[in-house]
Image (spheres, rainbow, N blue to C red):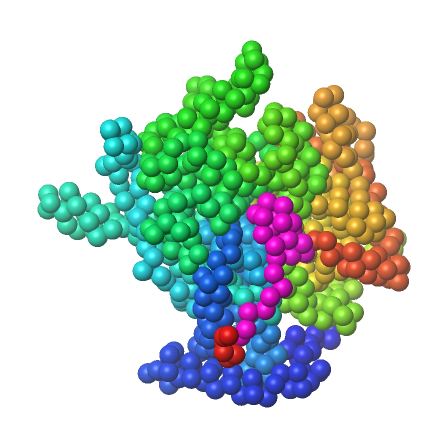
């Protein structure tokens, strides 16, 4: 097999020297050597590859800092409306290459590193992923930060600096095993601690109603320490800030224990406070009502709102009041976007500050809050909706509970006036759910307290209006919008696929084949169809439907080995939440199927199955450019949008998918005949829900399906533990909410069409080109432009801030 060129070798072939100014190259070499010798190696004689990575990271960071300072000065002087994107997750991945791309430094760095006898790609591989997210929601936040900077918006990302991000996934004997992600072990060259902006956050305590107003007293205090990461726009000299909070115990923490003499225990107990920012909860589309999680949600909101208000009060053109206590202009200067309900406490917290601290009357405070906050809904799955026990709020956030009750009472009074006697409507629309365990419905709180509510693809936004929040839509239809997700074309094209224009798909496949052979010791046929299914493992995403197709294909080859088959390499990757039994069983099934098929001499290289271990941003950047076929096969009406689907489209893979999420709009843009669309649509699923879905009907009627299920059930893929997959089969046969069998025949048929087209490279390539050409809508620049104009009330700016080496006017 030909050895594929590295990206840097490809760049060499087009004479990087001619592109990179010689002055830039010399300056970068000088800076690199300075960092290597003076800030890193010092008293060690020999530098390690990690030293080289840090020297390069610091060199690139030097180019950011001047632009960063100048951008913040520019915002201070111009005092634009500021956008605050609040998210419990920012799935950033690696930063070095993205920064070089956005600053226009990649060629100069490549050349300088080459001249020093080093390999840029090797250094890039040393960087740890910043895995502060689970999947789509966290990666969306990262793409949005990139677009907000590129569009010149005065925007800030606010979240938590988790000490441990999403776990590293190891596959042992076919099972997922989780390892802690100690991503900060070697330090993070991209962040800057800002202890001067440390803020207190209060928990527990009680509420005093005094003649001077309402006081939240006897609280426990945790300090929020900010760490700032620069976010460069694409070649516009704008550098915005992502500020992540880390929890720190105050010095007087557990003072009473000090006084009874247990000094050591008191110091050790500081960990209890600092645990707030210790670890990311690893659930995707699933609510786990743990006290620590609620603490995390309030921690980020309380610290961020203090910061927002401090910046509002101190901005140069704040209101004319000498001490800037007038909040009339607050919604004109501040927009807060809530990324799902996780930061929903921003609504009662802003009310608490305005009413209790700033002494504003309730109605005025509520008007300001409603004009400031907007809410993005990310899921319609009931198990994902946040519903916190009232008892937990009573203990942890007693004042916020009072505020939520007051918000709810005024809301229900309003509804009752419009719909007299409609008690059931009041029950459906209440923020408080009655029952054995009274709960707070955070989505209802968001809808009531936001100026806008948006879904993340057209079909999802329709479901939001017609089903999830139907009563609220009837009440305030003007609130509801759609903002179809997008992805940043910087990371997802320029960075991960620099040679798309050189009909480079073959090159990418060779390169990824070499990577797979090294990692998995499986011989890959690089001319086979690369069929890729990468996303979190979840029943609704239907990795099991893919498994049924793989086994069907396997059975067909075994039955008629003389026939000609289109060779396929099926790659499935993704993490399962540690407590999600069925998702972990699905991983075990995939690896077990691979063990049988990959070692069957009758099959040869016609079919290979690989489970991609530890799928993450940096692995996505390798696999997506190599894919031929993108699997987007969720049950219609379950995937809010999807963004992986867009990345594959942009990088020249064809999509096999259902009419779900953004697939609908992708088919609209490229033409439905340029995607492989199959299966039930939302209306069909709804009709089936009414009629009842009976898996056994399909099992009895379709011989190939029956054979596959029997093989799984009888231990064909688990000979050492024949009953291993009984739970999976039992679920598929008796309580499959996502109707896998109902789409089986259509899926198998559609995969046959994929094979037919793949045998005609000219026609396949025509469809690829059409897809790439029509992927423009799915840029997050378009998405953010819509948020800016239609929700935040700001206009994107093409103004290029002068670089640091040009004096300011």
The residue at the point 60 percent across, 66 percent down is 799
Q: Position of residue 748 (x, y in %)?
A: 80, 42
Residue at the location (66% across, 67% down)? Answer: 494
Taking 517 as reference, is 38 above or below it?
A: below
Residue nearer the viewer, 434 or 74: 74
Residue 713 visible to an observer of this rendering: no
Residue 557 at x, y = what percent? 81, 50
Q: Position of residue 73 (x, y in %)?
A: 45, 66
Q: Is residue 546 above or below residue 402?
A: below
Looking at the figure, which quarter contains the N terminus? Answer: bottom right
Identify whether 326 is placed above or below 69. Answer: above
User: Is residue 780 a member of the stretch shown in magenta?
Assistant: yes
Q: Using residue 462 as the reference point, say whether residue 221 is left or right of it.
A: left
Q: Residue at x 81, y 29 (%)?
A: 701
The answer to which of 495 and 787 lies nearer the viewer is 787
- Specify start and end residues of the magenta stretch as a single range: 779-803
Res 298 quadrant in image = top left
Q: Is residue 167 left or right of residue 588?
A: left
């Amino acid at each position: 097999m030909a050895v594929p060129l590295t990206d840097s070798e490809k760049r060499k072939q087009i004479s990087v020297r001619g592109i990179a100014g010689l002055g830039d190259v010399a300056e970068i070499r000088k800076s690199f050597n300075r960092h290597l010798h003076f800030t890193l190696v010092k008293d060690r004689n020999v530098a390690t590859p990690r030293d080289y990575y840090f020297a390069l990271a610091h060199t690139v960071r030097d180019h950011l800092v001047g632009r960063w300072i100048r951008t913040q000065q520019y915002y201070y002087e111009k005092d634009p409306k500021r956008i605050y994107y609040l998210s419990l997750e920012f799935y950033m991945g690696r930063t070095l290459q993205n920064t070089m791309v956005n600053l226009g430094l990649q060629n100069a760095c490549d050349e300088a590193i080459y001249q020093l006898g080093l390999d840029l790609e090797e250094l890039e591989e040393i960087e740890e992923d910043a895995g502060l997210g689970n999947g789509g929601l966290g990666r969306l936040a990262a793409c949005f930060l990139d677009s907000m900077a590129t569009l010149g918006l005065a925007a800030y990302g606010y979240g938590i600096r988790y000490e441990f991000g999403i776990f590293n996934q190891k596959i042992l004997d076919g099972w997922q095993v989780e390892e802690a992600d100690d991503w900060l072990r070697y330090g993070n060259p991209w962040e800057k601690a800002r202890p001067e902006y440390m803020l207190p956050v209060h928990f527990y305590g009680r509420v005093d109603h005094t003649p001077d107003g309402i006081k939240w007293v006897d609280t426990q205090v945790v300090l929020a320490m900010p760490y700032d990461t620069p976010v460069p726009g694409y070649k516009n000299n704008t550098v915005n800030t992502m500020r992540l909070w880390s929890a720190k115990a105050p010095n007087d923490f557990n003072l009473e224990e000090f006084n009874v003499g247990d000094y050591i225990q008191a110091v050790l107990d500081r960990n209890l406070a600092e645990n707030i920012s210790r670890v990311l909860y690893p659930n995707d589309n699933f609510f786990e009502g743990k006290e620590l999680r609620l603490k995390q949600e309030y921690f980020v909101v309380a610290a961020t709102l203090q910061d927002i208000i401090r910046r509002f009060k101190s901005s140069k053109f704040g209101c004319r009041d000498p001490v800037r206590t007038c909040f009339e202009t607050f919604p004109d200067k501040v927009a807060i976007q809530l990324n799902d309900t996780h930061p929903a406490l921003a609504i009662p917290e802003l009310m608490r500050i305005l009413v209790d601290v700033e002494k504003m009357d309730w109605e005025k405070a509520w008007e300001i809050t409603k004009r400031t906050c907007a809410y993005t809904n990310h899921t319609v799955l009931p198990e994902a909706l946040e519903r916190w026990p009232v008892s937990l709020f009573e203990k942890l956030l007693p004042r916020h509970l009072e505020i939520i009750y007051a918000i709810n009472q005024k809301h229900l009074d309003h509804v009752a006036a419009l719909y007299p006697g409609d008690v059931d409507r009041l029950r459906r629309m209440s923020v408080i759910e009655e029952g054995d365990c009274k709960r707070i419905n955070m989505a209802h709180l968001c809808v009531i307290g936001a100026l806008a509510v948006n879904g993340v693809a057209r079909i999802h936004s329709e479901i939001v209006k017609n089903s999830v929040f139907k009563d609220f839509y009837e009440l305030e239809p003007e609130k509801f919008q759609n903002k179809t997700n997008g992805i940043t074309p910087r990371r997802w094209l320029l960075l991960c696929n620099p040679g798309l224009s050189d009909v480079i798909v073959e090159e990418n496949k060779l390169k990824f084949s070499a990577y797979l052979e090294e990692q998995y010791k499986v011989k890959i046929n690089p001319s086979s169809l690369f069929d890729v299914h990468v996303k979190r493992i979840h029943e609704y995403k239907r990795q099991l439907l893919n498994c049924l197709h793989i086994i069907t294909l396997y059975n067909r080859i075994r039955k008629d080995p003389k026939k000609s088959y289109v060779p396929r390499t099926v790659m499935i990757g993704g993490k399962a939440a540690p407590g999600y039994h069925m998702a972990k069983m699905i991983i075990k099934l995939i690896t077990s199927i691979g063990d049988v098929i990959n070692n069957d001499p009758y099959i040869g290289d016609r079919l290979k199955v690989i489970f991609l271990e530890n799928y993450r941003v940096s692995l996505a950047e390798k696999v997506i450019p190599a894919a031929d076929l993108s699997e987007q096969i969720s049950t219609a009406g379950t995937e809010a949008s999807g963004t992986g689907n867009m990345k594959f489209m942009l990088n020249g893979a064809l999509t096999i998918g259902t009419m779900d999420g953004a697939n609908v709009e992708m088919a609209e843009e490229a033409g439905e005949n340029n995607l492989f669309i199959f299966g039930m649509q939302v209306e069909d699923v709804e009709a089936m829900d009414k009629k009842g879905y009976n898996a056994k009907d399909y099992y009895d009627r379709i011989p190939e399906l029956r054979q596959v299920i029997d093989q799984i059930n009888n231990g064909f893929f688990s000979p050492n533990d024949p009953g291993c997959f009984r739970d999976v089969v039992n679920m598929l046969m008796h309580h499959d909410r996502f109707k896998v069998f109902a789409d089986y025949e259509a899926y198998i048929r559609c995969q046959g069409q994929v094979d037919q087209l793949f045998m005609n490279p000219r026609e396949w390539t025509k469809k690829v080109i059409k897809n790439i050409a029509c992927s423009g809508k799915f840029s997050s620049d378009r998405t953010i432009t819509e948020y800016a104009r239609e929700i935040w009330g700001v206009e994107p700016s093409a103004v290029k801030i002068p670089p640091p080496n040009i004096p300011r006017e």
